[in-house]
Amino acid sequence: MDWRLDDSRPIWLQLQEQLTRRILSGHYPPGEKLPTVRELAAEAGVNPNTMQRALAALDAEGLTITNRTTGRVVTKDEAVLEGMRACLARGIIEQFYESAAELGYTKEQALELLKRRQNL
Amino acid sequence: MSAALIQCQDVWKSYGKKEVLRGLNLQVESGRIVGLLGPNGAGKTTLLKLLSGLLQPEQGMVLIEGEVPGCATKSMVSYLPDKPYFADWMKVQDLIELFEDFYADFDRMKAEQMCAVLEIDIRRKMKTLSKGTKEKVQLILVMSRRAKLYLLDEPIAGVDPAARDFILSTILNNYNPDGTVLISTHLIADVERILDEVIFLQNGQVIRQELVDNLREKERKSVDGLFRDVFRTKSYEGGEFSC
């Protein structure tokens, strides 16, 4: 899995998003220890302080738990993981409606298109 | 006493009639990787030379950990000049020995390991190495010290993109986490990801100093994009620079 960073937004935010996706996709499964800040920073080719900020944001959301003895592990709390998954899904759905609106479709029409696609 | 690692106050420096630094003020904290950015002639190299103690300011104050650059600061500052300065008859291993003699914080093992990773034969003479390999050797020597402050003047200018990646990861993996790295460069897009903070230098003054992520958030563009905007507009106003 590659790290992809674009130009327009803060790097730590993009790192946070990609780490979140890695957790939800099972790349880092529940209960597993994450690599250290420096390892992750080196892997992504970014400043360790920037990576630290992204990881601290994951801690704040409860996706990861930092423990002095075991380091940073992915939460086993299904509710937290599910909540985050639903949150990301909402974003994707909103994006879909927005893009459809740009093409001139109402929400109902967009939904109809989606259903039709599903039946193919 | 301020906690800043580097402190510059109203620093002036000229070469003959040409004023290069014109009342420069600057503070840099410990534990950061900082980009020193500016168009040609902005004063980047001159500032690094003042910090390394190679030049003296005509006016103003330059302090590193509260000390004037000189004997005391040489032991905590590791400087990579913009031009190679090693005698070309020397072998890489001679240079490693030279650095070991000169600097108490030099880690010989580290230097040799890095040479091995890059497949640089340390028995070769400097003059038999390519330009890019020479630059890599210099960077290896400079980064093998455990310094408080690394001053890197254009560390990636002369090497190919793959070697650039190597150099950037060398900087990331080897700098002392309590130390600060100050990198001057034009190749902003290449170094942007590894920086905490950027300093924009123009006409011998600091015109902007900010954390990279704050800047991206505020301006909604990359540092590289902002740099191009800032210095392009200025040149249209009849400034002295043509970018």
Image: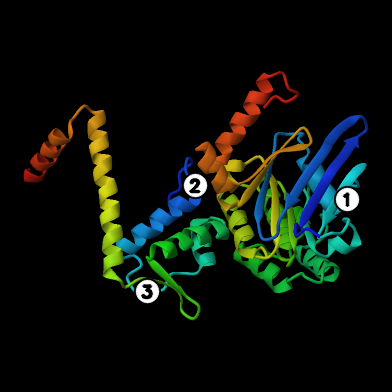
**Which residue does the image show at 27% across and 69% down from the upper left?**
A78
Residue highlighted by disc 1: B54
**Could you tell me if residue B79 is visible in this image?**
yes
The reply, left or right, for residue B119 in relation to residue A25 is: right
Name which residue type carries label 3. Glu
Image colouring: rainbow
**Which residue does the image show at 18% across and 30% down from the upper left?**
A105
Element class at badge 1: loop
Name which residue type carries label 1. Leu
- The numbered dot on residue A10 is 2
Residue highlighted by disc 3: A32
Instruction: Give neighbour class at mark 3: few <14, some 14-19, many 20+ (Cα, 10 Å).
Output: some
Name which residue type carries label 2. Pro
Task: Say if B166 sits above or below B184 in the image.
Answer: below
Tag 1 near tag 3, CB within 8 Å: no
Task: Say if A97 sits above or below B69 in the image.
Answer: above
The reply, left or right, for residue B223 in relation to residue B126 is: left
Q: Among all residues in the image, which is located at the extreme bottom?
A: A69
Q: CA distance from mark 3 to mark 2?
A: 27 Å
**Which residue does the image show at 26% across and 42% down from the upper left?**
A94
Tag 2 near tag 1, CB within 8 Å: no
Observer-nearest residue: B120 or A89? A89
Q: Residue B76's x, y, as percent? A: 80, 64
The reply, left or right, for residue B216 in relation to residue A115 is: right
Q: Residue B141's x, y, as percent? A: 74, 62
Q: In front of the other: label 3 or label 2?
A: 2
Q: Residue B139's x, y, as percent? A: 70, 57
